[in-house]
Amino acid sequence: MAIDLNPARRRLALFASCLAAIGIAVAFVDRPVSTWSHAVLRGFPLFNELTHIVDPLMPAAAAVLAVAGLTAAFSRWRPGETGLTLIACCLSEEVAYAIKEQLKWAFGRTWPETWTNGNPSWIANGAYGFHFFHGGEGWASFPSGHMTMISAVAAVLWVRARGWRWLWAALVALVAVGLVGSDYHFVGDMIAGTCLGSGCAAGVLALLAHVAEGGRKSGPAGAGAGARRSCGRPGGGPAPPRGGGRAGGGVARRGFGPGSRWGRRGAAWRPGGGPTPVRIEVDGARLPGPILPSAAARGQPPARRSQSSASWKTVWLPPG
């Protein structure tokens, strides 16, 4: 029997699953895997090299955000789909890093191995556990920063660049293999880092989606230049200018000639003749298009759906 959960319950179930996986790893998996890795795998330098996959991510994210912000501030540039994906990756990376640092301090977990200033560790002296709010580099194993960093970027790309999902999954897997082989982190640390990075990515994507949705709702209805005006509704926007033409108050037929204002802007005539495709919006959402109105090609107003239809709107571009 299939279980159909709404989005909020699915997220809650996923969060609970992450907590359960971390708890099982801490109780039953971390110590035996660390002992085995130290005895069998730690001597291979390849594992250490795999952990450096994440090294360029933080400086690259900071540089991209700085360049994008300055470019947008001093020019009319606005990011397209690729730019939004890149910005989402960078924001997810920066947010995940900041949260990860605070969690390391809060949980105070000891490391599998002794790395710095004789820190207590599982391999060196059997130290294993959480020392909450202890602070210090020797008590900063949980969550894994490596897995947090790679997952924060990979999760954004998993959603925004689906054709390359095999690559994003492979990058996460390679970093995980490197951490286990080098005995740099417990398995529970790695699970927590993966969940944290993925959660930050989901949050950033949701925020950007809300911002974009708000811009679509407020932008076209505003009084700024380039605002779209709609007709052929009910419920939407001002009517097009009346020009003594067709019954029902449409735009005059002569107003769509190639030399007229509405011919240049409304039907978007090209200099060499022939109309540029006109985009239509349905309930505020742009249709996949563009749509080429055959009537405009004959110097007539673009064909419109029935005035009584509540789901169709004809886009009118203001002259001038």
Image (spheres, helix red, strand yellow):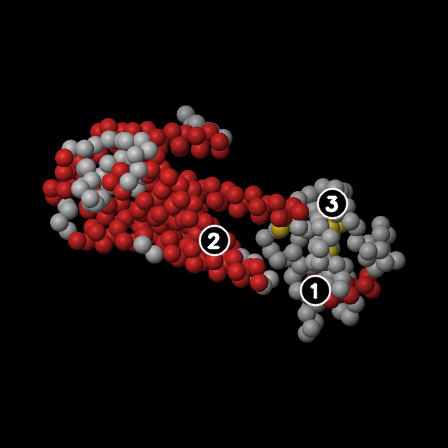
Name the image quarter holding residue 315: bottom right
Instruction: Give the image location of residue 75, x and y in percent.
Output: 58, 63
Residue 250 seen by the camera: yes
Dot 3 amino acid type: Gly
Label ID, residue 302: none
Instruction: Return the residue nearer the eye: 197 or 165.
Output: 197
Crowdedness near tag 3: few (<14), some (14–19) or many (≥20) residues, C-alpha within 10 Å: some
Which badge, 3 or 2, is on the more N-terminal residue?
2
Instruction: Name the amino acid type tagged 2.
Output: Ile
Instruction: Name which residue lies at 75% across and 47% down.
Output: 237
Q: CA distance from mark 1 to mark 2?
A: 33 Å
Assess disc 2: are there few (<14), some (14-19) or many (≥20) residues with their C-alpha within 10 Å of its C-alpha.
many
The residue pinned by badge 3 equals: 236
Mark nearest the camera among 3 and 1 is 3
Q: Which residue is mark 2?
A: 87
Residue 199: name its quadrant: top left
Left or right relative to 14: residue 80: right
Could you tell me which residue is drawn at 56 percent across and 43 percent down? Answer: 210
C-alpha gap between disc 3 and disc 2:
33 Å
Residue at the spot 45% in from the left edge and 42% down from the top edge? 202
Q: Secondary structure at mark 3?
A: loop
Q: Is 199 on the left-hand or right-hand side of 251?
A: left
In which quarter of the view is residue 268 placed?
bottom right
Which mark is in front, 1 or 2?
2
Secondary structure of the residue carrying numbered label 1: loop
Point out the image quarter for the C terminus: bottom right
Q: Mark 3 and mark 1: span between their CA atoms?
A: 22 Å
**Residue closest to the eye, 261 or 201:** 201
Q: Which residue is mark 1?
A: 268
Identify whether 45 is placed above or below 176.
below
